[in-house]
Image: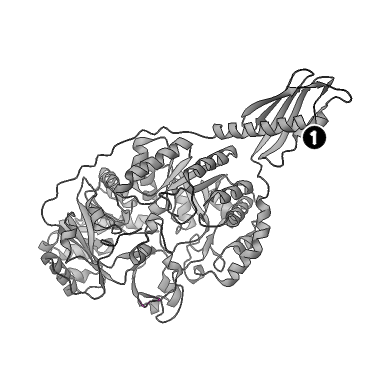
Amino acid sequence: MAEVLSPCGGMQVLEAVLKTGTDAVYVGSSRFSARANAHNFTREELKAAVYECHRCGVKLYQAINTLVTDSELESLADEISYACEIGVDGLIVQDMAVIETVKCCCPDMPVHASTQMSVHSKNGAMLANSLGLCRVVLARELPGSIIKELSSLGFETEVFVHGALCMSVSGQCYMSAVIGGRSANRGMCAQACRLPVSAIKGSERYDLSLKDMSYIERAKELEEMGVSSLKIEGRMKRPEYAAAAANALNAALSGEKPDMKTLEDVFSRGGFTQGYFDHKTGREMFGIRSKENAAASNTAFPKIHELYRTPCKAAAVSFLLYAHNGEELSLTACDEDGVTVTVTGDKAQKALNRPADIAYVTKSLSKLGGTIYELEDIRADLGADTAVSASALNDLRRRACEELDKKRAESNTKLYEFSPYKFDTPTHKRAGKPGIRVFISDISQLDMINESDVELIGIPAEMASAAAAKVSDISKLAVVGDRFTFDEGTQIKRLRQAKALGIERLVCTNIAHIKTGKDLSMKLSGGFGLNITNSVAARAYADMGLDDITLSFELKASQLARISSPVPVNVIAYGRLPLMLTANCPVRQAVGCKSCKGRLFDRTGREFMVKCSKGKGYVEILNSDVLTMSDKISDLAFADSLSLIFTEETPQQASDVIRAFRSGTAAEIKNKTHGLYYRGIK
């Protein structure tokens, strides 16, 4: 049976889902959690949570799934060490630094690829597994056909089946960071997508707000596909929400009809959607939380409280009572897994009236209402003239259950040895002024680019033939991998065609491209989508075969300068920074493709470009302001190369930008910004 995995943002929620019934929970501590605004768990609470889960036979996974800076690497190791010490059942991770730390310090600790790793294709899942990750949390945007394919690869897959949908692919949203300095990749998302944003200028719409998803009614279908774990989103939600979702999911897996009405009442944004699962995106998937939705929650809560008034029965228990006149009372309790304890009491007394019999003993020992146990069997070795008081039996039962709790928790807790490891990341020697790399969106942008001014020209795969015909030095061309794909086979075919033209380099925008590029014997460069924010991750990607890497644009320039890398580093120095990567076009659902102007407008009047992938199934929402560091190149002197990303620039404008960077002068641009290189993020 597929695992029911419940969210826990604090001890109250944990108590609710344990009493309702769940197979596993996932939690965050006060550090390195992608839900930093949840209550999360102190160290004392986390240890207590492990105990409570393990006595109930429930697993506890800890999310350590934020990006980490070099200044936090020591704290990261300490956090992982504590998880090993208390017996956490697995870590959910995003940053390669976490994966490397586990590999070097506690290799037996199970590691799961967080949805923040943006895994959505076969090669991405296989690359994650090759790194030692035993489970992959798949991107929420995937249709059932791809979920089925990825769940047949021989390792565990985890799928979100209920809860909020981010507009952006997880791990690829930078809107909160760029606009407000609160990074989603650091657990501080300000949920800018829930604010008014419109594809129709001047109207108040919510064209970035999706309904919550719910595949609970299709839980059996997912289980039959081979999905290992069915995950409920909601570490920011109340106990009632988590309990109702776990109850409905358990019902669905048992073949019963889940109570979707109560689920919708407790929290929804105008109902639920299964659009991604059915590969039917569009207007039906969008929604906001109305006053009516909020009012329905208040009426639903009392009903849901009944789900967790008493403990869920986690195990069957058998009792064996030994009671003979003049000897110590003894009660042995054994659960269905063979965990056994024995407690003793005062000496049994001679019966003055009626001696104890099995019916009398059963009446007291079967009172298990406040425990996690249900009675399976009672046996008794009773002396012929022995009396046992009800209070003595009740005390034996209570103490036996308490001791069984402790022993069950102990038997279900695996401790992992943590051996401290000092990472040594050598820094390659950089020579001279940073080189210039350009990334084009239109083939005409090549017309006025002097090849001698740039070291690399990045192009989409479908532009390979036209670009190869225009350049004199084809070695400078590099294909940029699609940031998201529903058809990895076609993407690989295009890359193979580009290589046949003589284009040898692939820019990896997600981890899938590392395997794809290696399979095609291509040279590999790391793109910004890999979210590299520390030296350990830089070394890890170099070890995977990347010739160079692009550092995250979310950090300050001073932080980036401190990152050691064994391969050359690149930073984005010009262009409209990507705010969101989404598989659901906000413009198409609002006005249709024929009326598309490629723009969104927020409540302040800012205008955001929407870049279409032309049939590949995703769009990119770009910043309203243009990043340019042409007048601040000295602050990026640590970089080996600077990336200039062109979208709607004319050939002349592209040429002018390159000239500004070569001369170190300010570019003639309206609405320009220095991005986060001086502001940084929380």
Quarter of the image where the C terminus is located: bottom left
Residue indicated by mark 1: 363
In the displayed structure image, the side of residue 634 where residue 357 appears, left or right: right
Residue at x 56%, y 41% (from the top left corner): 53
Q: Residue at x 45, y 78 (%)?
A: 204
Decide: is 100 above or below 357: below
Q: Was residue 436 drawn as part of the magenta stretch in this picture?
A: no
Nearer-the-camera pick, 31 or 532: 31
Given residues 324 and 549, the one toward you in this image is 324
Q: Amino acid at mark 1?
A: Lys
In this rendering, is residue 352 above or below 366?
Answer: above
Q: Is any atom of residue 535 visible in this view?
A: yes
Pick the residue in front: 663 or 464.
Answer: 663
Residue lying farthest to the right in this orientation: 353
For label 1, the SS is helix
Residue 603 magenta: yes
Q: Position of residue 213 (x, y in %)?
A: 52, 61
Residue 389 location, x and y as percent?
80, 29
What span is colored magenta in the figure?
601-605
Residue at (31, 50) in percent of width and height: 69
| Residue 75 x %, y % | 36, 44
